[in-house]
Image: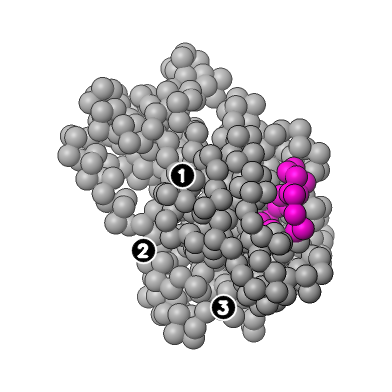
Amino acid sequence: MRNVIVLGAAGRDFHNFLTFYKDNPNYKVVCFTATQIPGIERRIFPPELAGRKRYPNGIPIFPENKLSELIKKFKADEVVFSYSDISHLDVMHKASIVLANGASFTLLGPNDTMLHSKKPVIAVCATRTGAGKSPAVRRISRILRDLGWLVAIIRHPMPYGNLTKQAVQEFTSIEDLERQNLTIEEREEYEAHIANGFKVYAGVDYAKILEIAEKTADVIIFDGGNNDFPFIRHDLLFVVADARRPGHELAYHPGETNIRMADYVVVNKVDAATTDAVDQIISNVRVLNPKAEILFSKLRVFVRENSKVIKGKRVLCVEDGPTLTHGGLSTGVAFKVAQEYGARTIVDPREYAVGSLKKVFEIYNHLRNVLPAMGYDRKQIKDLENTINGTKCDLVIVGTPVDLRRFMQINKPSIRVTYELEEVGKPTLKEILEKSPKLHKSARSAKSFKEVNLG
């Protein structure tokens, strides 16, 4: 029996354990490590999920910066890398730490970790966090509904709280989000789907999650997180590439894997990028995956309140947290709107940051004139609220996928900006979904398939 350490960030790591290691007599997982997300280490992966027979005390979770010590302490034979959106260079730095301490470095692939569904599955993934995957999912889900499908959305995991309680999560209303005391990141991913009338499933145990979702839907959409590859074997794979970050489709794990597997690559934000940047992505996709069809899109921005209030104001721009942090972007839609509508000054929030937000700016020192909407626990949400309220400005532009004003009191005027994906040119997503042979074939073989109009 080989001793294994799983390097993770509360998502892919737990899925890899449950699909490959849990009942495998050849391996014993001695611990998990955690990184990227603050406050998720020092927990226990509970015996209720790990299996009381083999792991009666559960499995401890430690900070990744203790990796060298952990390899020695637990006499680890292997360390399996199990999280996403990390450069190829940094993956190999971690591999070098592992090898230098005597253990083997492992990556688990789709054949060992993908679940099989009885229903047609469309997976939507990305090359980087913040590429525009979520609006792509929203667009695809609405198209499928218009074509007559019953759709369930399974979201990549974000279990940052009680893992036992979060094993299987089903969200059908905004009230469900309120009751479960979710982080801002979770709300950002679930709320828009719910507002559009779709059920969202997430959690830890994706075999059980998939089983439940299959009972409610004709088709499953797997909404990937960061740039991870799908947890469920798919009939169609759409991968969103960010035209503002050309070359990243070659440089980040597992975004390159997604490009190589993709049926369709959606080059997004083409209106915000140079022609050379778009051409570079096209060229790279053609080399990595000549069979993939390429389509183009932009993010159409909606200012939900009166945009005229922006002109001449000192503005604080609050943006999607993951996009700015491990996604690496320096601005978002709030910043774009502030510029377009004539803000006098876009305020640098760093001097007003309090509590954990100070540390965020220290870690992600590329950030200047935007405030990432960090909120992984109640304390950090309060730190975010205090930072917004303490910033000297005339107006707050909320550019996050969730309306922060639902659960915090902002003491100055504010407006909200949202965005949706819009195709540029041909083919469109609707044309692809109407005519896809893979989707038609899978639909005919699905037991619950009804007669629907697929064009």
Instruction: Determine whether 22 is above or below 245 in the image.
Output: above
Residue with the mark numbered 1: 359
36 or 155, which lies in front? Answer: 36
Residue 81 placement: quadrant: top left
Tell me the residue at 31%/52% (across/down).
90
Tell me the residue at 60%/34% (across/down).
379
Residue with the mark numbered 2: 251
Residue with the mark numbered 3: 272
Instruction: Determine whether 401 is above or below 176 in the image.
Output: below
Label 1 and label 2: CA atoms lie apart by 27 Å
Instruction: Report crowding for label 1: few under 14, some 14 to 19, many 20 or more residues within 10 A (C-alpha).
Output: few
300 or 444, which lies in front? Answer: 300
- Residue 46 position within the rendered picture, expressed as x and y whole percent measured from the top left: 52, 21
Q: Mark 1 touching mark 2, by CB under 8 A?
A: no
- Identify the image quadrant of the N terminus: top left
Tell me the residue at 34%/31% (across/down).
5
Tell me the residue at 24%/39% (across/down).
98
Disc 3 element: helix
Whether residue 215 is visible: no
Instruction: Determine whether 252 is above or below 310 in the image.
Output: above
Magenta residue span: 398-414
Instruction: Report crowding for label 2: few under 14, some 14 to 19, many 20 or more residues within 10 A (C-alpha).
Output: some
Disc 1 element: helix
Which of label 1 and label 2 is nearer to you? 1
Label 1 and label 3: CA atoms lie apart by 30 Å
Label 3 and label 2: CA atoms lie apart by 21 Å
Residue type at numbered disc 2: Ala
The answer to which of marks 1 and 2 sits earlier in the sequence is 2
Residue 30 placement: quadrant: top left
